[in-house]
Amino acid sequence: MDVPGYRPLYRQVYDIIVNKVAEGVWRPGEAIPSEHALARELGVSQGTMRKVLDALTAEKLLVRHQGKGTFIAENTQERSLFRFFRMVRPGGERVTPTMGDQSVRVRVARVADQQKLDLAKGAKVVEINRVRLVDGKPTIRETIILPSLLFLKIEDRMPLPNTLYSLYQTDFGINIVSANEELRADLATPDDQRLLAAPAGASILCIDRLALSLQDRKVEWRISRVYARDLTYSVTLS
């Protein structure tokens, strides 16, 4: 039985639950034991356990279904798009990108990869390059860098799905729980002109994303270059 140690009780219980998910004790979509059962197992009050489960629900690791219980959240295609794809039409109408050309290769991590993903010199990474379409037009080109050790043989799963985070969860046990994004404006490069049909001098939205798994592990670095046309980036602050 897992028993909290000498660190703050709430943090210990939180870490135990997160570790169980990371280790696959509970699978995506599976119900976890009741609040009362978990409190009894860990020897803590229901109030402490409720606080932990509330926090993990707010962080999208858990999802509650009224009258059914608490479940491990699934990164389905639809859910991942809703959470992590922020391009919309003016006024907020959501769009669904589709897949264009894609390629995957394994290579030695460059200095920038090492710094972004906390990798050792000489580590291998998976590099995914792909184009995504909106209304049939090439709109986004992405370069995605993954630590190879966490995604062994992902290149054998070509063609990769439109939304990768569900694949990460189901096939590799990697749950993306948050992402940090930095946005900047840029001018179309020759590759943007070739792959996105962007004219020379066109404005490109560059989105630099670092995706984190459980325990704040850096597992994906993604650079998306968007020839937006009539699209806009939308985020809700609360």
Image (tube, rainbow, N blue to C red):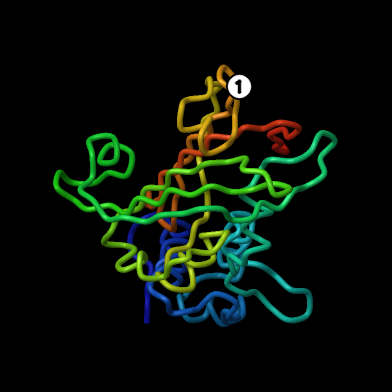
- What is the three-letter code of the residue carrying label 1? Ser
- Position in image of residue 45 (x %, y %): 56, 70
Q: Quadrant of the N terminus?
A: bottom left
Q: Does residue 238 appear in the picture of this structure?
A: no
Horizontal side of residue 122 vs 38, given as left or right: left
At 42% from the left and 76% from the top, the residue drawn is 24
* Relative depth, front residue between 187 and 18: 187
At 69% from the left and 78% from the top, the residue drawn is 69
Check disc 1 and report its element: helix, strand or loop.
strand
- Outermost residue, right side: 91
- Outermost residue, left side: 122
Task: Quadrant for residue 48, please give it.
Answer: bottom right
* Relative depth, front residue between 114 and 230: 230
- Outermost residue, top side: 201
Residue 228 in the image: above or below residue 15 = above
Horizontal side of residue 126 vs 133, given as left or right: left
Q: Quadrant of the C terminus?
A: top right
* Relative depth, front residue between 103 and 12: 103
Residue 111 in the image: above or below residue 41 = above
- Position in image of residue 61 (x %, y %): 56, 62
Q: Residues within 10 Å of mark 1 (few under 14, many from 20)?
A: some
Total tally of numbered discs in the picture = 1
- The residue that mark 1 highlights is 203
Horizontal side of residue 112 vs 130, given as left or right: left
* Relative depth, front residue between 117 and 17: 117
- Position in image of residue 189 (x %, y %): 47, 25
Q: Does residue 203 appear in the picture of this structure?
A: yes
- Position in image of residue 182 (x %, y %): 51, 30
Residue 224 in the image: above or below residue 51 = above
